[in-house]
Image (cartoon, rainbow, N blue to C red):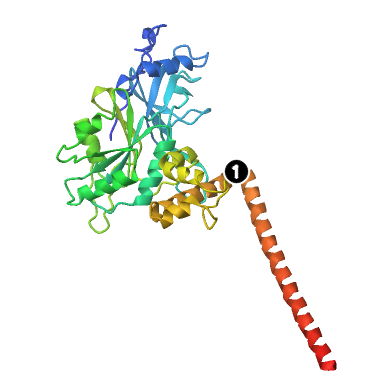
Amino acid sequence: MNTHASTSDPFISTTKQLSADSLPGPVEYGFTDTTAALFRANPAPDSQESAVPGRVVRLDRNRVLVASAGGLLHLPYPLSGVLPATGDWVWLGHNNAGEPAVVEVLPRHSALSRKRAFEASSEEQILGSNIDIVAVVVPVDRPLTHNRLERTLVAAWDSGATPLVVITKADLAHLADDVVGEVILQAAGVDVVTTSAEQGDGLEELMQHIPQGATLVLLGPSGAGKSTLINALAGRDVQQTGAVRAGDGKGKHTTTSRELVPLTGGAVLMDTPGVRGFGLFDAEEGMEEMFGDLEELFSRCRFADCAHQAEPGCAVQEALAGETLDPRRWASYLKLQRELAALARKHDAAARRAYQREWHQKVMSADRGQRAAERYRHDQAEDRAGKGGKRRKR
C-alpha cells in the first residue's frame, strides 16, 4: 500500500491540545481511552515535555512510518531502547537536532512472534504488537495443511491475542463445507468465519469480531486471499492483488511489509506478507491452549513422569489404542514439542549443557553396558572351555 507521510510536523497542531484531561492520539489507528491510560501510566521522558502519542504503522528499510493525531510521519529508527515493531504505541518527541523522533516504545499487551526464518537462528522475530485478534487465513482452494494450522494457532494463543480462523474463497471450491468441518474439528474452541470477498459473503460476521479500536492481524500463506479480503473490509483498493499459480496453488507476494490499515468504525487491520513457514518461539502457553486435551490425558497417566511410550497405565497410549486420540494430532504435538525443545537448547546455554551431559551419560551408559556384556560373554566362553578341558582329562 502506498501511504504518504505528512510533510508537516504533527506536533505543531497537537502540543497545544495537551492537558491533564486531554491526550491526543491517532483515533483511526486504534487510539482509545484505554490507550490514553496506557500512555499516562508510562509517561514520556522528562526531557520530552511536548511528546505526543503515536503508533507504528509500518517499518521500512531505513525509516519508521508513525501515525499521530496530526498525521503520518517517516522517522528514523531510535538510536537506543526497544526496537519498534508494527503496531507499537510510542512517544513522539524530538531528537537533539530538534527533529521529530520516536523517543520511547510503550509496553506491549500482546506480541505475535516466531523464530526467525533461517534454520540456524534461535532469535525471536516480532511480526506485530498490540494485536487483539489473530485471524488465521485458510483458503479452500488448496488442501488443508493440518500441521501448519495447528502451529499457527499455537502462536496465536501464545501472543496474548484471541485466535480466529477465517476461511477464504468459499465461492471457488465445491468442497467448502468439508474444509469448514475439518477446520472446526481441528481448531476446537476457536471461532471460524467463512468468507467470500468476491461475493461479499461473511464480511459482516467477520467485522463483528473486530470491535471499535481493536486490531486484527491476518496471517496466512501467499495467495490465500488476504489482500482481496482487506480491500473488501476497507471498502477501497488499499492492497494489490495477484493471481494464484494453477500448478501448485501458490500465490505471489503482493504484500511486502506488515502495515496497519484503518477500517471504518475505528477498527484497525494489520496485513502481513505470506509466510512460508512459522517456526514457534517460546510458545508453551500456546501449546497448553491448543493441546489442552492432551494435557488432560497426561494427568491420567499412572506415573507422573510418564514418557507416553511403553509405560504401563499410559493414558495416551490407551487413547491411541482406543482410537479416541487421532495419531496425526499426537504426532503433530510431539513434532512441535521437539521443535520448542531444540529452540530452547539453542537459546539457553544452560539447557544446552544439560542436554549434552545427559546425552554423554547415555552414551557412556550404553558403552559400559556393551563392555559388561562383552566381558560376560568372554567369561562364559572361558568357563565352557575350562569345563570341556576337565572332561577331556577324565
Count numbered badges in the picture.
Answer: 1
Residue depicted at x 85% and y 93%: 393
Q: Is residue 217 left or right of residue 304?
A: left
The quadrant of the picture occupied by the C terminus is bottom right
Residue 318 sits in which quadrant?
Answer: bottom left
Q: Is residue 322 visible?
A: yes
Which residue is nearer to you in this view: 336 or 298? Answer: 298
Which residue is nearer to you in this view: 99 or 216? Answer: 216
Q: Dot 1: few (<14), some (14–19), or many (≥20) neighbours within 10 Å?
A: few
Residue depicted at x 38% and y 24%: 55
Q: x and y percent of residue 122 in the render?
A: 52, 45
Q: x and y percent of residue 29 in the render?
A: 32, 24
Q: x and y percent of residue 336 in the render?
A: 46, 49
Which residue is nearer to you in this view: 288 or 1? Answer: 288
Q: Is residue 363 above or below residue 99?
A: below
Residue depicted at x 64% and y 56%: 359
Residue depicted at x 28% and y 30%: 209
Question: Label 1 belongs to which residue?
Answer: 348
The quadrant of the picture occupied by the N terminus is top left
Which residue is nearer to you in this view: 74 or 354? Answer: 354
Residue 263 sits in which quadrant?
Answer: top left
**Which element is circle 1 on?**
loop
Looking at the rendered structure, the kind of residue marked 1 is: Asp
Q: Is residue 255 above or below residue 355?
A: above
Q: x and y percent of residue 87 in the render?
A: 39, 29
Q: Is residue 195 left or right of residue 40?
A: left
* Residue at the extreme right: 393
